[in-house]
Image (cartoon, rainbow, N blue to C red):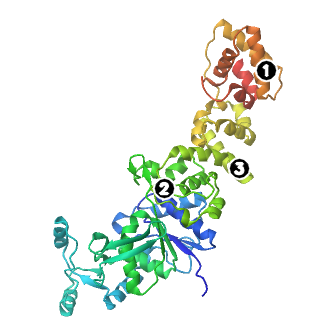
Amino acid sequence: SKRKMIRVRFAPSPTGDLHLGGLRTALYNYVFAKKHNGSVVLRIEDTDQSRLVQGSTNRLIECFQKLKINFDEGPTQGGKYWPYVQSQRLKYYREYSEQLMQRGAAYHCFCSKERLEALKAEGKLYNGHCRELPYHTREEYLRQGIPHVIRMKVPDSRNSTFVDDSVFGRVEFAHSTVNVSDQVLMKGDGFPTYHLANVVDDHLMEITHVLRGEEWLTSTAKHVILYESFGWDPPVYCHLPILLSSEGKLSKRDRSSSVQAYLSDGYQPAAILNYVAMLGWAPKDSSKEVLSLADLIEEFSLEDINKSQPRVDTGKLKWLNRHHLLLALEEDHHQHQILKEFKQLVIGCYGDQMVEEDVKEMTKDEYLLSVIRIMTERTSLLPEMVKESEYFFVDPPQVSHDRDHILMKDMLLSEICCLGNSTTNNDVTAVMETVANKCQCKYSDVAKFMRWALTGNKKGPGVAQVTSVLPTFVVKRRLS
């Protein structure tokens, strides 16, 4: 028989910004499908109307655009299985919940909120009170318009249900637990619960593999039962281990889990994807650490996902970011984008403080590129880089010097003037050695003074590097 094309989906709820766990799920779905020439669907699961956050869907889509994750189908792309927003698919859930009731696999439940809360307070599961209501009683309740929900009927022909998972193996769930109870499928407001909607949509959209967070593993037995009740084949399940922070489970409210925050801080999209991919997965060749999206597609396999829970480490992300920034600077298109962003940040931060004659020279791509290269040893985040490189764009405050330092400054200026308009690290080092000999002082004393005169700082990149990057006319002015 013809092999089915792999189809996967990322199905977030629009309840806030994209977090690292969500991005990892989307990324694994994406690279797995692309490796096998399959399709990736973006589906918005907004059936819990009480938790919706205005604008979340648009921010989510913008985030993926910045990360260069392009879905094949979805709310903006369209596709064969439109619509891709669950609140626009209610007719399907009503139709299939009716079908379940006709099959005897679901039933109307008229239990009041008070009754259910009393059971919960006693630590008891829903006890199937309405499961075997006589036909005439049910019809009378419906005729009277008594509020109700539709519940699935967990089969009593067996005591447990098995879930086969690509990461966690075969897992058994007893029907006597909360994980496998007579779950509500259609709520009183006419909206489905996650359990019905995701099963119906995955079937109708021909999803072959479901890659999602480990937190959904305990609910999967219900989904397996629903597939059985409909007479459908379930997809292949692959549950991804929960991400941990230094204090436990990574909270969605923690800024360190926000993808948008990482992008705003200046992390390279390729570095974020590389880092997130390694949270629970690694290529077979462990020496490979810096990976592009194309590399991830080539290397990824479900078999290499580790079920131990990975811990988020921003130190590793910073390390990867530096490597990806340097790689991006070697590619014309990416270099242009980085320089454009850096220039905007520089002008926004220092534009009104810069000496007028410096602006043209200091906003040239060649100069900005030199500043970025020299600063990547200290930080690879462009906003941080701009803050730490003020002296490359703004003259430091003038200070008075003692007689010895005035003499040293005059000598430095005289030697720099002999170099012409272009200087190298070696040129500047030779100048400082010459001045040290003439002043009969240590080379380090000259270097410290020159750094202070040119930057107003005691620390930073090597003073020879700074001097060779700064325009010569700026160096002369600051030493005057």
Residue type, label 1: Ala
Looking at the picture, how far across and down is residue 68, in whole percent? 61, 60
Mark 2: give few (<14), some (14-19) or many (20+) Cα within 10 Å.
many
Marks 3, 2: nearer the viewer: 2
User: Which quadrant of the rendered structure holds the C terminus?
Assistant: top right
Q: Residue at x 47, y 64 (%)?
A: 57
Q: Residue at x 48, y 82 (%)?
A: 204
The residue wearing badge 1 is 430
Looking at the picture, how far across and down is residue 441, in whole percent? 70, 10
The residue wearing badge 2 is 20
- In whole angstroms, how far apart are the C-alphas of marks 1 and 2? 50 Å
User: Which quadrant of the rendered structure holds the N terminus?
Assistant: bottom right
- Left or right, 102 with respect to 115, comes to right
The image quarter in which residue 350 lies: top right
Q: Earlier in the sequence, mark 1 or mark 2?
A: 2
Residue type, label 3: His
Vertical relation: 324 (above or below) 49? above
Q: Residue at x 59, y 65 (%)?
A: 31
